[in-house]
Image: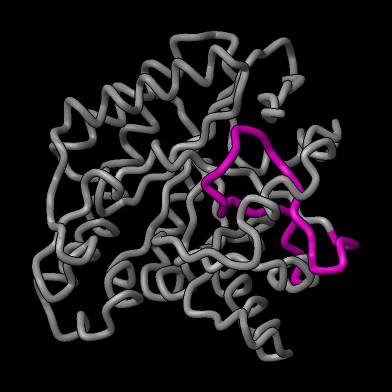
Amino acid sequence: MTEAEPTLTWPAGHTSGFALTIDVHAEWFWIDRYPEAVRLPKTLSIGHYGVLRGVPRLLEVLAQTSTRATWFVPPTVASRYRSVVEDITAEGHQVAVLLTGIDIDAATRNTVDQINKALDTVAEAAGSRPSGARIAGSRITDAWVPLLVGAGVTWTSTIPAGNAPSLWTDASGSIPMLDIPYNWELTDYTYLAFNMPPATYPPGRSRIAPYETVLRNWEDVLVANRGLGNLVVPRFEASVIGKPGRISMLEELLELARSEELTWLATLPEIAAWATDTNQADRWLDQSRHRWAASTTHHS
């Protein structure tokens, strides 16, 4: 029997949801995948551009469209580019932590300390401790659940599967964690990431898809899910979508998202609070865990 689409009860008469998310990897987008990139100025410049030029450009577009986003920031970025994170929060956006470089297989006290340190570092720049997290390079296992819950994280947005908030649990099934899935089709690096060897992404397949085709894909995904009453969560990267030739793609997507008054435009903390308060995710307990089984590696 085919699993039915989730039926969500949206707040205040809304019939669907839209939550924009933006990752700010800076140069660590490449370093985390290819450590030799630390010696490649051209490669690092892509990340530098994203945080120093892409973020301000994105903030300007979001201000013009009265859109609030949820930004995922690694502790390394929060520490090195603190003023950028301060600018993001000053514009009324939400900041969550992007967890990188943590060996979850160890699952030791040291791992817990790493998560807490990451949260504290982002909090110093953002002004408050993040309630949410996204796991970079997503090697997803149920071992994450008790560690994140123990650190005070109440929601994640890591699993690119599903169109509704769902619960995944630890190995015993006793500790639930809310995950708000993002749409894999609504990412920018899937279509637009480009770099030259040796830090090619994806390996051996440097390419950029036509902007018009990509935008049409995004719009089709948004319209289809909106018609089904689903939650739509794009995942963009500041160094990719924040360039002049691409920022107009985001502007057009936001225009479409805002064209339907019954669509709830919210931040992920707002989505998490609504899903928790109304038990929206309870019926989808373990939905994510079953789909992703023991562990699956994905590029972030």
Residue at the image point whose x is 64% and y is 76% from the top: 115
The structure's colour scheme is one colour
Q: What quarter of the picture does the C terminus occupy?
A: bottom left
- Residue 239: image quadrant is bottom left
Q: How many marks?
A: 0
Residue that protrudes farthest toward the right in the picture: 174
Residue 189: x and y in percent read: 29, 50
Q: Which residues are magenta?
A: 151-175
By secondary structure, the bulk of the magenta-drawn segment is best described as loop
Residue 87: x and y in percent read: 42, 52
Q: Nearer the viewer, residue 91 or 134?
A: 134
Residue at the image point whose x is 83% and y is 36% from the top: 283
Residue at the image point whose x is 67% and y is 28% from the top: 2
Q: Give above or below for 248 relative to 235.
A: above
Q: Is residue 9 left or right of residue 133?
A: right
Q: Give above or below for 117 relative to 78.
A: below
Q: Is residue 148 left or right of residue 50?
A: right
Q: Nearer the viewer, residue 154 or 215?
A: 215
- Residue 24: image quadrant is bottom left
Q: Is residue 193 left or right of residue 76?
A: left
Q: Is residue 89 left or right of residue 231?
A: left
- Residue 120: image quadrant is bottom right
Query: Magenta segment: does it hold 205?
Result: no
Residue 68: x and y in percent read: 50, 35
Query: Magenta segment: does it hold 168?
Result: yes
Residue at the image point whose x is 30% and y is 43% from the top: 188
Residue 125: x and y in percent read: 51, 66
